[in-house]
Image (cartoon, grey):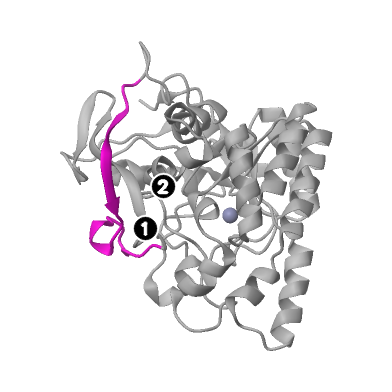
Amino acid sequence: MPLNNLPLTLDGPSFDEKVAIASRVSHADFSLWGGLVPGNVAALPELHARGAIAVKAFMSDSGLPEFPASDDYTLLRGMEVAASLGMIVAVHAESDAITRGLTAEARGAGQRGAMAWAASRPVLAETEAISRAIHLAEATGARLHVVHVSSGRGAVMIAEARARGVDVTSETCPHYLTFTDEDVARLGAIGKCAPPVRNAEERARLWAAVTSGAVDMVVSDHSPSPPSMKEGDDFFAMWGGIPGVQTTLGTLLEEGPAHGLDLGSIVRLVAAGPAARFGLAPSKGTISVGADADLALVDLRNRHVVSQATLHYRHPQSPFVGRTVRGLVVRTILRGEVVAEKGAPVGEPRGRLVRPVGRVAA
Ligand SMILES: [Zn+2]
């Protein structure tokens, strides 16, 4: 069962079910992904027809038995079909063979710590998978997006492929820009995610890739989980995933300027970039005549320390607790109407599905 109790969107009916649930509870407009798994390539056209913005494939074990990793054959056939539809294929890029083998080695040697776990998923496992995905996208003409890139080296490979004409983009997440592997060893389970948070050298490379424009967007990859799944002292066994939807903007506003990121670049990374890539512009992601007037008013003078009390998550836990972030969203406006004031929702949920091309479903 997915952690948020929503169905995995592997075909049309499950997509419809998720739209129905989200339409009842979401205060923001939303788009949905589909999944690409062995055996569901034939469902890509119906997912595309319903408005899925992309399909995501895991190149390594997802941790969920119902969302198995895509082998190269599945990626090949999936990308062929996606290319014919103009649909984006997104990949979680870690080599299954490398991570599986190194994990078995470490487990066999009785290892269970954070550093040993990180060593079982090295940067090489990410760059090998990225290069393979790029190769397949180049051969099939598919549009490729690499989610949550953890390493500067991976981000640079993607930018180089784009420069030679491959239709590929990338995203990274604030936790990769904020923490190091040593921080995760200190933080424990709350800092575990895959690909793992890297060392300080790789983090510096990743920052350089973000500020140079090699990385297209910075996203939360918000991954909630009940505290019970983050318990124990075996780092290999505990659940991986970091919640970050509430701290992404504040982290970039706080940390970005020291790395040369100006406000305009941050807006591009969190709003304009994703909207453009996933076909949601010009209605979304821009402030312009005819756009949807989706606005977040941010008090940039505000700096505050993240605490459990300030988190609105169902499970108020985050590795960002104790860190200073900048900016407070004081008002949120959806299609011209106020939907949140000072962090509290206003009125009934009125979020709607947004399909690529940027129009909300009627
Ligand atoms: Zn992933």
> Dividing the image into 4 quarters, which one contains the C terminus?
top left
x and y, in percent, of residue 154 in the image: 71, 47
**Residue occupying the far front of the picture:** 258
Which residue is found at the position 80% from the left and 27% from the top?
A: 164
Asked if the residue at tag 1 contacts the one at tag 2, i.e. Cβ–Cβ closer than 8 Å, the answer is: yes
Look at mark 2 in the image and give the residue it sits on: 251
Look at the numbered disc 1 and say if its residue's Cβ is closer than 8 Å to ligand 1: no
Question: In the shown orientation, is residue 8 left or right of residue 38?
Answer: left
Q: CA distance from mark 2 to mark 1?
A: 9 Å
Classify 157 as above or below 234.
above
x and y, in percent, of residue 144 in the image: 68, 37
Q: SS for tag 1?
A: loop
- Which residue type does callout 1 highlight? Arg
Classify 240 as above or below 147.
below
- Which residue type does callout 2 highlight? Thr
Q: SS for tag 2?
A: helix
Q: Which mark is residue 323?
A: 1
x and y, in percent, of residue 356 in the image: 51, 27
Give the magenta range: 292-318
